[in-house]
Image (cartoon, rainbow, N blue to C red):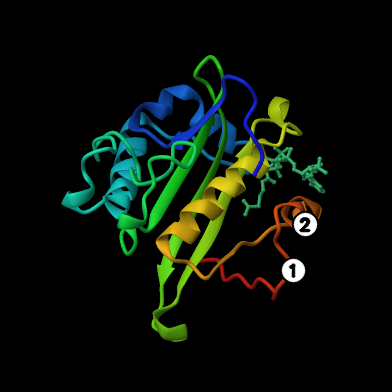
């Protein structure tokens, strides 16, 4: 596990992160588009519903309406085994010392019939702001998503990446497996 730089924190995405530079960080990854606050809120609410904890988990975690996947970790602390079986979509962000989002990553949890009802994590949309790369923030994001994945009971996490990023994911403990296929609609 690597530590975050002084003053930086990791936490679940929040609804007001629209104003903290979340979409700009994603722009280092790919084209994002011009997303209004209204459209952002719709998508945020949809994601937050998938991450909502059962009522018995409501106490130490923030309000569902404010935090997407509120069972996600705040540096690993807010997350608890009690949430096993709940939550399918976790978006986390790294915040710098002045409250700006400088990194993000997503874990989508797939609950299967095969492998004795196996649970698989899909790691998506990892991005670190250009001027913040090389400070181990990417590694910290992967560590946090790996932590959530193991806590919800995933037996593995998988992701697609370019050849250029293979070295990064190897440093994070991943190994090459399979081949990606895509069908665009
Ligand atoms: N190739 C080889 N090694 C790398 C690479 C790379 N492209 N990037 C980082 N590393 C190494 C680092 O040197 C470091 O090694 P060390 O421990 O020996 O010093 C280790 O990996 C950890 O690097 P971090 O500092 O944590 O990497 P960073 O914070 O810069 O984040 C990331 C890496 C996420 C790839 C960042 O460069 C980025 O946002 N790139 C643009 C967006 C992108 O391509 N995202 C990934 C898409 S794939 C997906 O989302 C599933």
Q: Position of residue 11 (x, y in %)?
A: 45, 35
Is label 2's Cβ within 8 Å of ligand 1? yes
- Nearer to me, 180 or 36: 180
- Nearer to me, 113 or 148: 148
Residue at image mark 1: 176
Mark 2 near mark 1, Cβ–Cβ under 8 Å? yes
**Which quadrant does the N terminus fall into?**
top right
Q: Residue at x 74, y 68 (%)?
A: 176
Q: Quadrant of residue 3?
A: top right
Tell me: 38 left or right of 152: left
Residue at image mark 2: 166
Q: Quadrant of residue 78?
A: top left
User: Tag 1 or tag 2, which sits nearer the N-term?
Assistant: 2
Tell me: 2 left or right of 152: right
Work out whether 35 lies above or below 5: below
Q: Residue at x 42, y 49 (%)?
A: 90
Tell me: 47 left or right of 174: left
The residue furthest top is 98
Is label 1's Cβ within 8 Å of ligand 1? no
Q: Residue at x 72, y 25 (%)?
A: 131
Q: Label 2, label 1: how many angstroms apart (C-alpha)?
A: 8 Å
Q: Quadrant of residue 7?
A: top right
Label 2, residues with CA under 10 Å away: few <14, some 14-19, many ≥20: some
Tag count: 2
SS at mark 2?
Answer: helix
């Amino acid at each position: 596990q690597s530590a975050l730089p002084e003053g930086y924190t990791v936490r679940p995405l929040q609804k007001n992160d629209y104003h903290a530079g979340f979409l700009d960080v994603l722009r280092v990854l790919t084209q994002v588009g011009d997303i209004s606050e209204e459209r952002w809120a719709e998508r945020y609410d949809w994601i937050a519903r998938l991450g909502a904890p059962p009522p018995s988990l409501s106490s130490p975690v923030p309000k569902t309406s404010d935090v997407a996947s509120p069972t996600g970790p705040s540096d690993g602390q807010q997350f608890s085994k009690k949430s096993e079986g709940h939550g399918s979509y976790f978006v986390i962000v790294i915040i710098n010392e002045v409250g700006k989002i400088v990194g993000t990553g997503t874990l989508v949890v797939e609950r299967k019939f095969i492998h004795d009802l196996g649970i698989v994590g899909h790691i998506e949309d990892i991005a670190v702001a250009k001027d913040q790369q090389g400070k181990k923030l990417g590694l910290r994001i992967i560590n946090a998503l790996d932590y959530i994945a193991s806590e919800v009971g995933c037996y593995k996490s998988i992701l697609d990446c370019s050849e250029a990023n293979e070295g990064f994911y190897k440093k994070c403990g991943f190994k090459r497996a399979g081949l990606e296929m895509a069908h665009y609609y």
